[in-house]
Image (tube, grey):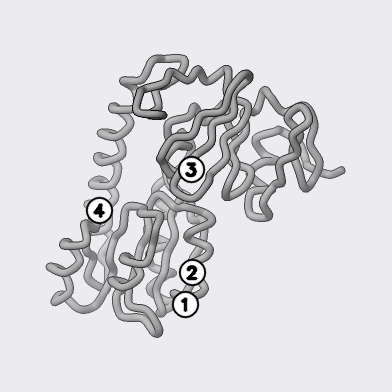
Amino acid sequence: MGKYKCYILDDEPLAIKVIEQHLGKFEEFEICGSSTSPLAALPVIKTTEPDLLFLDIKMPDITGLDLIEILQFKPSIVLTTAFREFAVEGFELNVLDYLVKPIAFKRFVQTIEKFLENQSSSEKKIEGQIEEGLFVKADRKKVRVRFQDILYVEGVKDYVKIVLNNQTILTKVSIGNFQKLLPDSSFIRIHKSYIVAKDKITAYTASDVEIGRKEIPIGRIYKESFSKKMGSGTNS
């Protein structure tokens, strides 16, 4: 598994800085973005699909609680606010934790430990899969998919299309959640809608990947991570 991606949304730049400094002390995490504007943050959160979202409650245009209800992709959410009275409402929305500003590092550590415990529990469930693949629900039955047979995966709204050597399987799961089931060393997210099998790539440029005759675009925000995973630049 790679590092856990975090996004910070708070209308106070200083509050963002504090969380960035706290997160910087944990090697398991990387910050995939931050913003002081909920409207600017929404499309980025949708694209990057962070594992953990630090979310202020009182913000202009959209409150943090409203944003939780708007989000289709549901990361683990930690509410950050100077107002304790929102705690009950926040937990009713199934948030991971509730941090009151100014956020003390000792209290922040407790939140991180809680997140890691939840992830460990989820990963143990994933380990229950067959070692070389997994079973997915399709056409009212469980279908076995071997990792070595996957060419690429395409996200289609609330579904993923798993393209194999000899068939295509459609199953209801978000592409972000399906990515967590795949071995990180063998698959690369190259676009908000595509994950490709690294060993099935037959050619690539700075802007797309070829798997046989299929050309798949590389999203702008994925270019750097793709280049690192391929071990070289993506220059044409």
Nearer mark to the viewer, of 2 and 3 = 3
* Marks 3 and 1, the one that precedes in the sequence: 1
Disc 1 residue type (three-letter) = Ser
Residue 46, x across and y down, in percent: 49, 58
Q: CA distance from mark 4 to mark 1?
A: 24 Å
Task: Kindly identify which numbered label has been placed on residue 111.
Answer: 4
Q: CA distance from mark 3 to mark 1?
A: 26 Å
Front one among 217 and 28: 217
Which type of secondary structure does the marked residue at label 1 adopt? Answer: loop
Kindly identify which residue carries mark 3: 175
* Marks 2 and 3, the one that precedes in the sequence: 2
* Marks 4 and 2, the one that precedes in the sequence: 2
Q: Quadrant of the N terminus?
A: top left
Task: Kindly identify which numbered label has been placed on residue 41.
Answer: 2
Instruction: Report the residue at 60% width, 42% height from top.
Output: 194
Instruction: Give the class, few, some or many, for how many residues have Cα within 10 Å of label 2's Cα (few <14, many ≥20).
Output: some
- Judge whether 82 appears above or below 156 on screen: below
* Marks 3 and 4, the one that precedes in the sequence: 4
